[in-house]
Amino acid sequence: SHLGMLSKVMYLSDLQFNIDTWKRELRFHFNEMDTFQEKLEEIVTRIEDPVELKKLEMFQNRIMIEKDAISKLLHRCKNKALSIRNVDFSESIDGRLQSEQYTLKDDMRTYIKLHYDLKEEMMDYFLDVL
Protein backbone atom coordinates (compact mmCIF):
# COMPACT_ATOMS: atom_id res chain seq x y z
CA SER A 1 0.00 0.00 0.00
CA HIS A 2 1.29 3.43 -0.94
CA LEU A 3 0.33 5.02 2.37
CA GLY A 4 2.14 2.32 4.34
CA MET A 5 5.23 3.01 2.25
CA LEU A 6 5.05 6.75 2.83
CA SER A 7 4.55 6.48 6.58
CA LYS A 8 7.46 4.03 6.65
CA VAL A 9 9.74 6.49 4.87
CA MET A 10 8.67 9.24 7.26
CA TYR A 11 9.19 7.05 10.30
CA LEU A 12 12.69 6.19 9.12
CA SER A 13 13.57 9.80 8.39
CA ASP A 14 12.38 10.77 11.89
CA LEU A 15 14.46 7.96 13.31
CA GLN A 16 17.46 9.14 11.30
CA PHE A 17 16.96 12.67 12.63
CA ASN A 18 16.95 11.39 16.23
CA ILE A 19 20.10 9.39 15.66
CA ASP A 20 21.91 12.34 14.08
CA THR A 21 20.85 14.51 17.01
CA TRP A 22 22.14 11.95 19.53
CA LYS A 23 25.43 11.62 17.68
CA ARG A 24 25.98 15.39 17.74
CA GLU A 25 25.15 15.50 21.42
CA LEU A 26 27.41 12.57 22.26
CA ARG A 27 30.36 14.04 20.37
CA PHE A 28 29.83 17.35 22.14
CA HIS A 29 29.73 15.64 25.55
CA PHE A 30 32.88 13.67 24.72
CA ASN A 31 34.79 16.90 24.02
CA GLU A 32 33.26 18.48 27.08
CA MET A 33 34.57 15.62 29.24
CA ASP A 34 38.04 16.27 27.80
CA THR A 35 37.72 19.88 28.95
CA PHE A 36 36.67 18.77 32.44
CA GLN A 37 39.58 16.34 32.49
CA GLU A 38 42.00 19.20 31.70
CA LYS A 39 40.46 21.29 34.46
CA LEU A 40 40.98 18.47 36.96
CA GLU A 41 44.60 18.09 35.87
CA GLU A 42 45.12 21.80 36.38
CA ILE A 43 43.56 21.70 39.87
CA VAL A 44 45.43 18.60 41.05
CA THR A 45 48.68 20.54 41.37
CA ARG A 46 47.09 22.91 43.90
CA ILE A 47 45.48 20.34 46.18
CA GLU A 48 47.05 19.42 49.51
CA ASP A 49 44.10 17.78 51.23
CA PRO A 50 44.11 13.98 50.69
CA VAL A 51 40.30 13.86 50.96
CA GLU A 52 39.95 16.41 48.14
CA LEU A 53 42.54 14.50 46.14
CA LYS A 54 40.55 11.30 46.55
CA LYS A 55 37.46 13.11 45.26
CA LEU A 56 39.38 14.39 42.27
CA GLU A 57 40.59 10.90 41.39
CA MET A 58 37.02 9.65 41.65
CA PHE A 59 35.92 12.30 39.14
CA GLN A 60 38.75 11.37 36.76
CA ASN A 61 37.59 7.80 36.98
CA ARG A 62 33.98 8.73 36.29
CA ILE A 63 35.06 10.77 33.27
CA MET A 64 36.84 7.71 31.87
CA ILE A 65 33.73 5.60 32.44
CA GLU A 66 31.54 8.24 30.82
CA LYS A 67 33.78 8.55 27.75
CA ASP A 68 33.65 4.80 27.38
CA ALA A 69 29.85 4.89 27.61
CA ILE A 70 29.75 7.67 24.99
CA SER A 71 31.91 5.63 22.60
CA LYS A 72 29.60 2.63 22.97
CA LEU A 73 26.48 4.74 22.40
CA LEU A 74 28.05 6.39 19.33
CA HIS A 75 28.82 2.94 17.97
CA ARG A 76 25.22 1.88 18.51
CA CYS A 77 23.96 5.02 16.78
CA LYS A 78 26.18 4.30 13.77
CA ASN A 79 24.97 0.70 13.57
CA LYS A 80 21.39 1.87 13.86
CA ALA A 81 21.89 4.39 11.05
CA LEU A 82 23.31 1.61 8.87
CA SER A 83 20.35 -0.66 9.47
CA ILE A 84 18.03 2.22 8.50
CA ARG A 85 19.86 2.81 5.24
CA ASN A 86 19.71 -0.88 4.41
CA VAL A 87 16.04 -1.30 5.27
CA ASP A 88 13.89 -3.18 2.77
CA PHE A 89 10.78 -1.08 2.13
CA SER A 90 8.77 -4.03 0.87
CA GLU A 91 8.96 -5.58 4.33
CA SER A 92 6.84 -4.33 7.18
CA ILE A 93 8.66 -1.91 9.49
CA ASP A 94 10.42 -4.51 11.20
CA GLY A 95 9.67 -4.89 14.88
CA ARG A 96 13.38 -5.26 15.49
CA LEU A 97 14.13 -1.76 14.23
CA GLN A 98 11.40 -0.37 16.41
CA SER A 99 12.32 -2.23 19.58
CA GLU A 100 16.01 -1.37 19.13
CA GLN A 101 15.00 2.26 18.78
CA TYR A 102 13.30 2.13 22.17
CA THR A 103 16.21 0.58 23.99
CA LEU A 104 18.60 3.08 22.40
CA LYS A 105 16.22 5.90 23.29
CA ASP A 106 15.96 4.68 26.89
CA ASP A 107 19.72 4.26 27.18
CA MET A 108 20.25 7.74 25.78
CA ARG A 109 17.80 9.18 28.30
CA THR A 110 19.55 7.41 31.19
CA TYR A 111 22.96 8.41 29.91
CA ILE A 112 21.99 12.10 29.56
CA LYS A 113 20.70 12.19 33.11
CA LEU A 114 23.97 10.69 34.39
CA HIS A 115 25.97 13.10 32.25
CA TYR A 116 24.31 16.17 33.74
CA ASP A 117 24.56 14.78 37.27
CA LEU A 118 28.30 14.24 36.85
CA LYS A 119 28.77 17.67 35.32
CA GLU A 120 26.90 19.38 38.12
CA GLU A 121 28.87 17.51 40.79
CA MET A 122 32.15 18.45 39.16
CA MET A 123 31.18 22.10 38.85
CA ASP A 124 30.21 22.17 42.52
CA TYR A 125 33.53 20.54 43.31
CA PHE A 126 35.42 23.22 41.36
CA LEU A 127 33.69 25.91 43.40
CA ASP A 128 34.62 24.10 46.63
CA VAL A 129 38.29 23.68 45.84
CA LEU A 130 38.98 26.92 44.00
Image: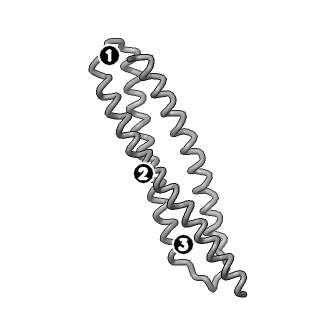
Compared to residue 19, the image places residue 115 above or below, namely above
The residue that disc 1 covers is 47
First of labels 2, 3 by sequence position: 2
x, y (%) of residue 85? 51, 75
- Please tell me how crowded label 1 is: few (under 14), some (14-19), or many (20+) other residues with Cα within 10 Å: some
- Foreground label between 2 and 3: 2
N-terminal label among 3 and 1? 1
* Mark found first going from the N terminus, 1 or 2: 2
- Point out which mark residue 4 bears: none
Q: Which residue is mark 2?
A: 27
Which residue is found at the position 45% from the left and 28% from the top? Answer: 122
Q: Nearer the viewer, residue 69 or 85?
A: 85
Q: Is residue 86 above or below residue 114?
A: below
Q: Looking at this view, is 4 or 58 the one in front?
A: 4
Quadrant location of residue 103?
A: bottom right
Q: Position of residue 69 (x, y in %)?
A: 46, 47
Contact between labelled residues 3 and 2, with CB atoms less than 8 Å apart: no
- Residue to which mark 3 is pinned: 84
For marks 2 and 3, give the CA distance. 21 Å
